[in-house]
Amino acid sequence: MSIDTERFIASLPERIDAIVTRAARTQPQRIALREDARELSYGELDRAVDALAARLASAGVRAGDRVMLIGENSVALVVALFAVSRLEAWALLTNARLTAIEIDGIKAHARPRLSFFTVDASADAERHAQRACARVEALDTVPIGAFALGAVDAGAAQEAHGLPADRQCAALIYTTGTTGAPKGVMLSHRNLLFVAAMSSTLRRVSPEDRVYAVLPVSHVFGLASVCLGSLYAGATLRLAPRFDVQHTGQVLRDEHITIFQGVPAMHAKLIDFFSTRGGLNAPALRFVYSGGSPLDMPLKSAAERFYGLPLHNGYGMTESSPTVSNTMLDAPARDASVGPPIPGVETRIVPLEEQADGTVDDVGELWVRGPNVMLGYYRDPAQTAATVTLDGWLRTGDLARIEQGNLYIVGRGKELIIRSGFNVYPAEVEQVLNGHPAVLHSAVIGRSVEGNEEVLAFVELRPGAQCAEHELADWTSARLAPYKRPATITILDALPAAASGKILKHRLGTTSPRSGP
């Protein structure tokens, strides 16, 4: 597909909430959002955004403020996202499944003006709201479900606003990073709109499409590609707060879903469940996509037999809003390629080192440049400078090669583990384990399983300390979101280490557990 990217970018609106305004004018009666409890037309969605924006403003939200949205996929969460945009504030998107400790850490760094909880759609959000003594309320004009507003932080700093779309932050999404400390990725309106519009264009999404949205809107894949991309095209977004294999199959069948995007683990679970029950009955399905985690060939082949459709694939990261590349609708990959870079995005492979004969390997670190590259990390100019070059290249830290214009991801730097589509950084899990009084130090690695990765932890106790694996499991469960928790915790007499003291992680998994009781 030939796209004039300069003209394409120039046609984008200034803010993400303009998507709703435009559709409300052209197709006010068409269904925009649907969940188990309710649905809103585009006209109703626009009125709900206005009403909630007015309520947030009356609570003290100003342009340039951060508003922390704590929830799971729901009508209320999407309305809140656009309402924050309409006030020219920043949406601090936070998955309600995070623990109280994790949410408090993000909140302490971002200093939001106000917190918004989707209490009607998420039991976890309701618990966080109760802990914050947030007030539960609802809109009188358009029913979006109950929500709660926390106390206003009168001392929250007001960031710059009224900037051009390519410099104005729309969403702040925290990733933990390799250090274990939270990093807030600032994504502009232009970042998100570019990926949303390009994704929907390349997939030929239309108002006739019905898109199943189970990928969390609080994460960039679910936000930009699924949520904003679908609504940019005027399609119907069918929201689900969590993945349930039986419910997903029922919705795909009964609501004539045409587009389903998921992480590999979701596809694997659907195959396992429905293959023994006569197969998946989803006659309207026309496009199936896998992202968020590496897709192995056995799962890709099994999924294509299961759906009777190509399983499209792509690559991205939070810092690139997220899409860098994806396989083309009319040219699905036959192998593990993640497709060519999307129009408007440049890539380059930076060699790791020269060979003995002076040549360089075709595998190197992937660098990316384009309108999808983040503004930077919030309140962290040093880390921003280390990640984005002065001329705009994003250092992804991932190892890749390019063959015949297609991108192949061959390894990930920084020891990143991707669990069910969510990034898990070993340093973050190690930091929690090391906080236990009995733990001397720990090491965390990933292990591939079909369509997914598991988190494995290895621990060395302090001399004389007594602690059981189940006690450490309870400790991590109270401090880490479910997808970050180790599948196994193994206590060793000593972690394998070099003379320098560096832990030799490649030897973990072949080391015997500790001796004695």
Image (cartoon, rainbow, N blue to C red):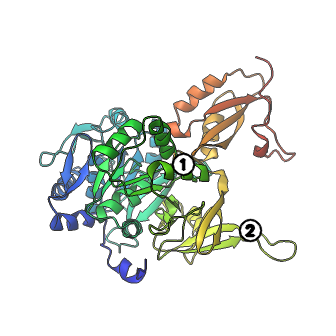
For residue 44, which quarter of the picture? Answer: bottom left
Q: Residue at the spot x=34%, y=68% of the render? A: 161
- Tell me: 295 left or right of 91: right
Where is residue 322 drawn, in percent x and y?
48, 62
The amino acid beneath tag 1 is Ala
Where is residue 108 drawn, in percent x and y?
45, 47
For residue 151, which quarter of the picture? Answer: top left
What element does badge 2 sit on?
A: loop
Q: Residues within 10 Å of mark 2 (few under 14, many from 20)?
A: few
Where is residue 154 drawn, in percent x and y?
32, 50
What element does badge 1 sit on?
A: helix
Q: Residue at the spot x=35%, y=75% of the render? A: 164
For residue 485, which quarter of the picture? Answer: top right
Q: Which sits in the foreground, 362 or 451?
A: 451
Q: Is residue 438 visible?
A: yes
Q: Residue furthest left?
A: 141
- Tell me: 163 left or right of 510: left
Q: Is residue 461 visible?
A: no
Q: Which sits in the foreground, 56 or 253?
A: 253
Q: Is residue 485 above or below residue 44?
A: above
Q: Which mark is residue 515?
A: none
Q: Residues within 10 Å of mark 1 (few under 14, many from 20)?
A: some
Q: Is residue 292 above or below residue 374?
A: above
Name the residue beneath numbered marker 1: 302
Of labels 2 and 1, earlier in sequence is 1
The amino acid beneath tag 2 is Leu
Name the residue beneath numbered marker 2: 352
